[in-house]
Amino acid sequence: MESTVTLAQVARAAGVSASTVSRILNGTAKVSAEKREAVERTLAQLNYQPNVLARSLASGKTMSIGVLTQDISSPFYGDVLRGIERGLTNSGYHPVVISGHWRAQEEVEAIDFLVSRKVDAMIVLGGVAPDEQLQQVASYMPLVALGRSVPGLTQQCLRLDNFAGGYLATKHLIDLGHRTIAHIAGMPTHRDAQDRLAGYRAALEEARLTFDPELVLEGDFLEQSGFLAATRLIDSRKMFTGVFVANDQMAYGARLALYRRGLRVPEDISLVAFDDLPSSTFTTPPLTTVRQPTFDMGLAAATCLLRMLRGAPSWLPPMGPELVVRESTTRRRG
Amino acid sequence: MESTVTLAQVARAAGVSASTVSRILNGTAKVSAEKREAVERTLAQLNYQPNVLARSLASGKTMSIGVLTQDISSPFYGDVLRGIERGLTNSGYHPVVISGHWRAQEEVEAIDFLVSRKVDAMIVLGGVAPDEQLQQVASYMPLVALGRSVPGLTQQCLRLDNFAGGYLATKHLIDLGHRTIAHIAGMPTHRDAQDRLAGYRAALEEARLTFDPELVLEGDFLEQSGFLAATRLIDSRKMFTGVFVANDQMAYGARLALYRRGLRVPEDISLVAFDDLPSSTFTTPPLTTVRQPTFDMGLAAATCLLRMLRGAPSWLPPMGPELVVRESTTRRRG
DNA sequence: CTGAAAGCGCTTACAG
DNA sequence: CTGAAAGCGCTTACAG
């Protein structure tokens, strides 16, 4: 049955005041050993469970961290969340997560929701919530943003260099001798997508390979769109031997499209992607991709927030994109 | 800046009592049009944001639904969570999710945490928390369990028939002419794993195929374990032409192991699994698997809870496992 | 229809 | 060291 034992009841039973019980519970002040013992016994006996709501209302702290994610079932954010969860373990703080689905209005409301829930701090994962809102929230509570860089909050933002990542991926293909390299990009509204595309172009340029707009198709970062884009690409009869796909999920789709058309990976087409999702180790063949340290990013965000909550300055470790060469890319044949 | 406007301030500014403002906010009672107007104007003007904590403490309702999941980054539970999120949309209720990691102690604490947060209802996804605890929680708040069946709470539990699912998967292989069928099972401590294995055995028996313990290896429902199990199986030099893998994630690993050993799917080995994760449509080849309607299960759980919260009796739609035939299985050659 | 008052269950100056 | 009291910001009988 729900514990409905209150502090006052414990106090009465133990023959002390509520203040004393509260102090013992919170370790707030010295209390004589005898009282402490009596109270602790009563606490256990009555199986007292503090009412978190009342405590929060009175203290002004909820011991919860708001987390704005975009899609609760996304493998990418899922791994970040796991890192956050880990980073918060044993800190006394708990995450409260809500999804924004990359829709500005939804994100604004989600953030308002977290604020109204009086979270003590906030972590924002990607998304398109207005910078102003984040700046404002950051003005009265610790905030860390992952996957975006908010002007004026650079110390609290962790965003991989997506340009460098796109460059790395493309350069890898070029180094393997590929000369006609297609790109399946993300939505142009997506900063990450733009940057990866720019990195792709920079690598081509550096190698004096001409940029062919017809070799660049657009997806939406989900598997299906990668499948469609690759299918269109193949059916266009344009020649290409390598593809840089803007994220792993689309690469999964693209890989299936190639399979459907009887093109082998990597023998016929080399495939390199971006993210390094946990499952990319197990695709057939294992995917060459630019790694984002998702778990570590989540962990770092949590750790940073905890520091800030203690009053220390924010500090986020530098993290860069890293190419993980597996088996979906190989030297160009013939 | 954080809205620190209180109800009392709004009341004063509008020239009414706090009670009246509260009533207007909650639509609790009739209020004269003029007062309502004045109050509403003030509300907007001051950009009043109710303090959820105070409201909850006073009303005894938090408008939050506790969700105990097992792994925040699991693709399986992720999809269930998405369904829950969807089902709760526009209901005024919000999910608060916490992970138990299939560890009894952790789950017990997680449930206690949710209770102490005064959630209005609870959804439990799988796990090994003691039946007694769930029964107790269910005695004072609406509770729905997915993936487990708690004695005495059958109306509030939704659990697919895993035996039937295991049978279906194996039967499919048998119908395709396979006679030596291996099984990569889940942990024996896992009820689902046991049932799927039992279904496998039942199908073999029905077809008068002898059960060979050496053809059954054990994994832990993660990719890596599927890879290891399949590798061991192949290297054991036992003959087999079909494999029933107890879940999709292990099947991904197994599929890679076969690839590594130069065995083709489905030409050399047919592979059937269990779950139908979103990504199983995009594996190479697309995976034949027993579908669990994860999203719909989450949706149904949320809907059921909402009904119960309204005082209506619990009701969960019947859901059965369903074989989704894709391209990882084929008729036995030779 | 509307207000004053009590109460939700804690925490935290304030005295002593 | 410890208690009485005020206060956190709402909601909700209780009167009128």
Image (tube, coloured by chain):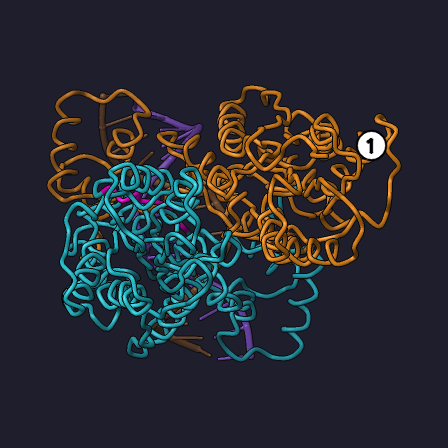
Chain colours: A orange, B cyan, C purple, D brown
Q: On the rendered image, what quadrant is the N terminus of chain A found in?
A: bottom left
Q: Is residue A318 left or right of residue A44?
A: right
User: Which residue is disc 1 drawn over?
Assistant: A204
Residue range highlighted in magenta: B97-103
Expressed as whole percent of the image width and height from the top left, the position of residue B238 reads: 23, 44
Along the viewing direction, whichever of B296 and A252 lies nearer the viewer: A252
Expressed as whole percent of the image width and height from the top left, the position of residue A123 reads: 56, 38
Q: On the rendered image, what quadrant is the C terminus of chain A found in?
A: top right
Looking at the image, which residue is at 39% across and 29% down?
A91
Looking at the image, which residue is at 20% across and 48% down?
B216
Please tell me whether residue B41 is drawn above or below residue A159 in the rendered image.
below
Looking at the image, which residue is at 42% across and 68% down?
B296
Membership of A70 in magenta stretch: no
Q: Is residue B20 left or right of residue A46?
A: right
Looking at the image, which residue is at 53% across and 49% down?
A74
Residue A52 falls in image quadrant? top left
Q: Is residue A38 visible?
A: yes
Please tell me whether residue B53 is drawn above or below residue A244 in the rendered image.
below
Three-letter code, disc 1: Leu
Q: The numbered mark 1 sits on a residue in which chain?
A: A
Membership of B100 in magenta stretch: yes
